[in-house]
Each structure stands twice: as structure tokens, then as C-alpha cells.
Image (cartoon, helix red, strand yellow):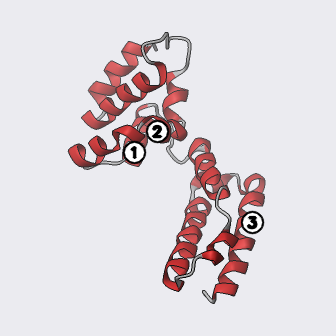
């Protein structure tokens, strides 16, 4: 399916916000260059592209359409008949999680803020572990999560969080 045809189908079958986000992402990524050579499906199901190319469009998504990047992502994945709970989303979440060092939370002086930050990190781990993609591939994917969980448990013990 060619680029213009895909955009017309998205406009016809998806919400206005999903269509506008798709156009915005293409404009940001390709800036009127030849995009026929890439797979738009691969581009649109890669969650990191939503993070990269919709950051400057977030106010429109939230304020004008009362929506979110996640809702747009889910809708576009549905359009391409792909599950949003996929490898791309998993890798995006893991990358965000891996960039956080649980031990650094011990430097937060305010106990309530420290506890809140630690619990938010734990929630991010729980979101990953409860994802379908992770459950289906747990054997191969669990090593990275286990390392982060062990560090988190040490921090929770030291911080006195149960």
C-alpha cells in the first residue's frame, strides 16, 4: 500500500486526532522527502516514533482532542491490525526503565518524595511484567527486569518501604 493511500485510509477509518498525528509524524520524520521507500507500517507501530515525533504536538493531542499518545498509538496499531502490546512498546519501556538507577533514589532527602519515586519505579516494572508481550517472551526478557528488581528491593529495604 502506498503512502497517500495509507493516509487516506487512516483518515477514513481512524479518529481525527489519530489522522492528524500520523500526518504530523510523517512531516516531522521525512520533511517532504521520499517516503515511498520505507514501510509506513513499521514506522507507525514503533512506539519510540510517537515519543520522538509527537513531543511538540502533545498539547494539541491533550487539549484539543482530550487524548494521549498512547491512545493514538493503540488506534494506529489497530488500523494496521497489530497489537499495541508489542516488542516496540516493550523495548521503549525497558529503555526508559534501564536508564533509571534505583540506588540514586536514596539521594532524595524528602522521605515522602523518595518513597513516591521508588513506588513509581516499581509500578513501571509491574506494567512491563503484566504486558502480554513480556509474558509471552518472559524466558528471554526477564534477565534485565530481574536486575532492576533486585536493585529496587535493596533500595526499598534501606528506605524502609514494604
- Residue 70 location, x and y as percent? 41, 48
Which mark is first along the chain, 3 or 1?
1
Name the residue beneath numbered marker 3.
146
- Residue 51 location, x and y as percent? 48, 42
- Secondary structure beneath disc 3? helix
Which mark is first along the chain, 2 or 1?
2
Give me the C-alpha separation between circle 1 and circle 2: 7 Å
Which mark is first along the chain, 2 or 3?
2
Classed neighbour count for the residue bearing mark 2: other residues with Cα under 10 Å, few (<14), some (14–19), many (≥20):
many
Name the residue beneath numbered marker 2.
50
Report whether 104 appears left or right of 40. Answer: right
- Asked if the residue at tag 2 contacts the one at tag 1, i.e. Cβ–Cβ closer than 8 Å, the answer is yes
Residue 135 appears in the figure:
no
Which residue is depicted at the point 60% across and 86% down? 161
- Residue 81 location, x and y as percent? 47, 34
Report whether 117 appears left or right of 27. Answer: right
- Asked if the residue at tag 3 contacts the one at tag 1, i.e. Cβ–Cβ closer than 8 Å, the answer is no
Give me the C-alpha separation between circle 3 and circle 2: 27 Å
Classed neighbour count for the residue bearing mark 3: other residues with Cα under 10 Å, few (<14), some (14–19), many (≥20):
few
Q: Which of the labelled discs sits on residue 69, or is there none?
A: 1
Q: Name the quarter where the C terminus is drawn.
A: bottom right
Report whether 152 appears left or right of 86. Answer: right
- Residue 64 location, x and y as percent? 21, 44
Amino acid at each position: 500500500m502506498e503512502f497517500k493511500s495509507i493516509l487516506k485510509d487512516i483518515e477514513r477509518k481512524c479518529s481525527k486526532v489519530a489522522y492528524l498525528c500520523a500526518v504530523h509524524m510523517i512531516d516531522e520524520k521525512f520533511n517532504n522527502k521520499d517516503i515511498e521507500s520505507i514501510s509506513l507500517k513499521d514506522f507507525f507501530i514503533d512506539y519510540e516514533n510517537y515519543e520522538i515525533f509527537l513531543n511538540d504536538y502533545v498539547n494539541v493531542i491533550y487539549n484539543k482532542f482530550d487524548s494521549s499518545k498512547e491512545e493514538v498509538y493503540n488506534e494506529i496499531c489497530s488500523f494496521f491490525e497489530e497489537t499495541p502490546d508489542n516488542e516496540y512498546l516493550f523495548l521503549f519501556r525497558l529503555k526508559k526503565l534501564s536508564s533509571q538507577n534505583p540506588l540514586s533514589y536514596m539521594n532524595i532527602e524528602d522521605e515522602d518524595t523518595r518513597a513516591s519515586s521508588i513506588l513509581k519505579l516499581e509500578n513501571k516494572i509491574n506494567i512491563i511484567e503484566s504486558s502480554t508481550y513480556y509474558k509471552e517472551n518472559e524466558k528471554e526478557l526477564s534477565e534485565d527486569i530481574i536486575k532492576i528488581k533486585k536493585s529496587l528491593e535493596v533500595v526499598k529495604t534501606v528506605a524502609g518501604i514494604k
